[in-house]
Image (cartoon, rainbow, N blue to C red):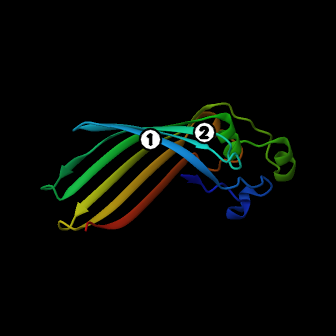
Amino acid sequence: GGSFGRYPNQNSYLYGLGNIKWTLETKIFAKYKTRLYSISSEIANDILQKGHKGYYLKTSLGTGFPVFNLTTFVRPSLSITFADSNYLNSFFGVKENQSLSSGFSKYSIKNGVKDVSINLLLIYRLNDKVSLNGTFNYKKLMGTVAKSPIVQATDQFSTSFSIGYLY
């Protein structure tokens, strides 16, 4: 996998914090699935040591069930992400030199919980080949990450829509 990093030209609010370069990540993924639920975990590490230089562990608990005569499938899940201090300080910390150039107060974070998220996947099957898919995600930054001076909002929402074709 990979991390695209962070570049201040993406958001003027980040001016003076410097870049977090893109990097390649090794990822190990495990999933246990039963008929009613699944548990999955993913651990990622910056193998090039040129980006965030850390690791994170994301663990999810999900379930899924059909509704409306098996044409619609709903899959809610709950996730929590833990990260080491290198990862957290790269994205949410403020070093002394960054403090001087950005105006943010110096801020350091220890290992801990980065975020908790709730995800809802909806799949509507138009026929055996075509489906409409929607994902709704709510993420809450937690603890010392949420208190970082560079965090503008602790609550983050995202959605995506797609069309699937099975061939």
Name the residue rendered at 67%, 35% in the picture: 85
On residue 55, which mark appears?
2
Image quadrant holding the C terminus, namely bottom left
Name the residue rendered at 25%, 36% in the picture: 34
**Considering depth in this image, is 44 or 96 the residue closer to the camera?**
44
Seen in the image, is 116 located left or right of residue 143?
left
At label 2, the amino acid type is Tyr
On residue 113, which mark appears?
none
Q: Position of residue 96 (x, y in %)?
A: 85, 41
Q: Crowdedness of circle 1 by 10 Å Cα count: few (<14), some, many (20+)?
A: few
Q: Crowdedness of circle 2 by 10 Å Cα count: few (<14), some, many (20+)?
A: many
Q: How many marks?
A: 2
Q: Mark 1: which secondary structure? A: strand
In the depicted structure, whether residue 23 falls above or below residue 108: below
Seen in the image, is 127 located left or right of residue 8?
left
Q: Which residue was labeled with disc 1?
A: 29
Q: Mark 2: which secondary structure? A: strand
